[in-house]
Image: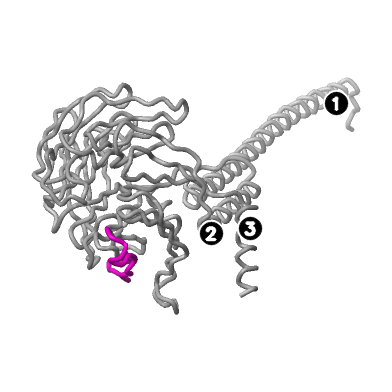
Amino acid sequence: MLKYNSNSCFADFRSLHFLMEDALELIEREAGRLTRHLQAVELQRLAQSSSWWWKQVQEAKGAWEDLARWRFGQKLTGPWPKLWASKLQEEEDTLNRFEGGALKSEQVLVFTSFVRCWVSDEQMLVAGLYNGALQAVHWKTGQKELLCGRHGDEVIAVALNDEHILSGSGDPGYYARRPLDASVRLWRRSDGAALGCFEGHVDSVRCVALFKSQPLMGFGMSGSLDCHVILWNLTNGSVECASLLSGPCRCMSILCEDVDSNGARARILAGSGEGVAELAVSVRQGAVTVTQLKFVSAYVEVSSLSYFHGSYRQEIDQGCWPKSFLGAPMKVAVGSVDGQLALLQGGSCRAVHELFKSRHGNRDVVSIVMISESRILLVSRAGIMTFLAWNGLLASDGPCRQLWSKTGWRMYTSTIGLWGPRRLISDGFDNVIRVFTLESKPHFEKMMMDSDEESASE
C-alpha cells in the first residue's frame, strides 16, 4: 500500500514553483529583448522610409531646379508654383514689350573715344575703342578706368571672364583696308594691367573668346579674316592650336564647357565664310586639341550668329552633349555681310531671308540676339534695329515675319546685347554706349490701344 508523504510532496511543489518563476523570468527577459528588437527594426524601417522620402523630395527639388534652369536660364528657390507663375508672367510681359518695340533710353555711358565693341557681365562692362584702348565701367559704382597699354589699331573684339580680358584689333569692316595691328592682347581684370601681346594672325582679328572654368581658363581663342581660329596659351602667349576654316571668321561664341575627372572640354560655334563651323576643344592630361566636328552651309557670308539652347539646356548642364549641336534640332540664326538672315537647324540651312535693301546703305548684320526660340533681335551696320518672329517653314507668310524695325540710330552700330531680362545695349559711331529699357506695361497697353483705335478709325 502506498503511503502519502506530505514532506516530499511539499518539496516537489516548491521545486515546481521555482521552476515556474525561472520560466516566467526567462519569458519576461526574452519578451523584453524581442520588444526592443522589434522597436529597433521599426525605428530602422521608419528611418529608411524617411530617408527614402527625403531622397525623393531632394530628387524632385533637383528636377524642378534643372527644369527652371532650362526654362528661365537661372536657378529658382522658394515656393515653386508662385515663382513659376511670376516668371512666366514676367517672360510674357517682356516678350510683349519687345514685340511692341517700346524702347526707352535709360542710361548713357560716355567713353574717351569712339566705341567699336563691348562685353559685359553683372559687375562690369569693357569697351574696345577706336584709338586702340580699352575702358572699363563698373555697374555698381559707375567708376570708369582705362586699361594699361593699347593696340596699334581699332579694338574690334573683346571678351571677359573672372580673371582676364582678351581683345583683338584690326579693320572693323567699313574701311576694307589691311590692319595696322592684328594682335591679340591679354589684360588682368582686377587692376587692368597688360599681361601680354600675342602675334599670330595676318589679318584683322574679328572675334575673341575666354573660357569660364578651369583648366580651360588658361586658354583663349581668336578668329580672324585670315580664316584661322587660334587657341592661345595665356600663360606664355604661345599658339596651342591653330585651325584653318573654309573662310573668314567674323564671329565666335562658346556654346558650352564642362569639367570632369579627366580634364575639360568645350564646344564653340564660329563663322566660317559662307557657313558655321562647330569646334570641339579638349584638354586631357596636358594635351590640348581643337577639332572641327561639323560645318553647315548658310549660303551667305556670315558676319554674326546667335543660338537658343531650348531643350538642350538640361543636357548641357549635365554634360550629356550630342555628337554635334549643329546636327541637332537646336536653332541658330546667322546674319550676313549683305543684309540677309539665314536660319540653321538640324544640320542644314532651313531658310534665307533678305532684311536690308541697298537703299539702307551699309547692310552688314553686325549683331544678333535670340530673345527666345522664335524671336530674334538684330541690328545692321547702318543702325537699323529689327525684331523678327521665326514662324516655321510651313507658315503662310514665310519662315520669318518682321514685327518692327527702328531707324534713326547713329551710323555704324557694332554690337547689341541683353543686360537683364528687360534691357538691351547698343553703341554707335560715337563715344557712347546707350542702355535701353522696355517701357512699362501700362505704356505698352496704351500704345496698343491707340494703335487699335487708329486702325478702327481707318
**Is 41 a magenta residue?**
no
- The residue under label 2 is 100
Horizontally, is 280 left or right of 255 in the view? left
Q: Please give the name of the residue rendered at 24% of the width and 59% of the height, measured from the top-left corner.
A: 337
Q: Is residue 323 visible?
A: no
Q: Which of marks 3 and 1 is in front?
A: 3
* Percent of width and height locating residue 163: 31, 28
Q: How far apart are marks 3 and 1 (CA)?
A: 103 Å
- Residue flagged by tag 1: what amino acid is it? Phe
Label 2 vs 1, first from the N-terminus: 1
Circle 1: is it few (<14), some (14-19), or many (20+) Cα within 10 Å? few
In the image, residue 75 lies at what x, y percent?
A: 51, 42
> Label 2: few (<14), some or many (≥20) within 10 Å?
some
Mark drawn on residue 445: 3
Report the span colored magenta.
341-362
Q: Which mark is first along the chain, 1 or 3? A: 1
Quarter of the figure with the N terminus = top right
* Residue under the image location 14 percent in, 37 percent down: 183
455, above or below 7, in the image: below
Position of residue 345 measured from the top left corner of the image (x, y, whole percent): 33, 65
Q: In this view, does 126 lie above or below 301?
A: above
Q: Quadrant of residue 358?
A: bottom left
- State if disc 1 and disc 3 touch (CB < 8 Å): no
Q: Which of 62 and 347 is in front in this view?
A: 347
> Disc 3 residue type?
Glu
Verify CB contact (< 8 Å) between mark 2 and mark 1.
no
Q: Does the magenta stretch include residue 356?
A: yes
Determine the CA span between mark 2 and mark 1. 105 Å
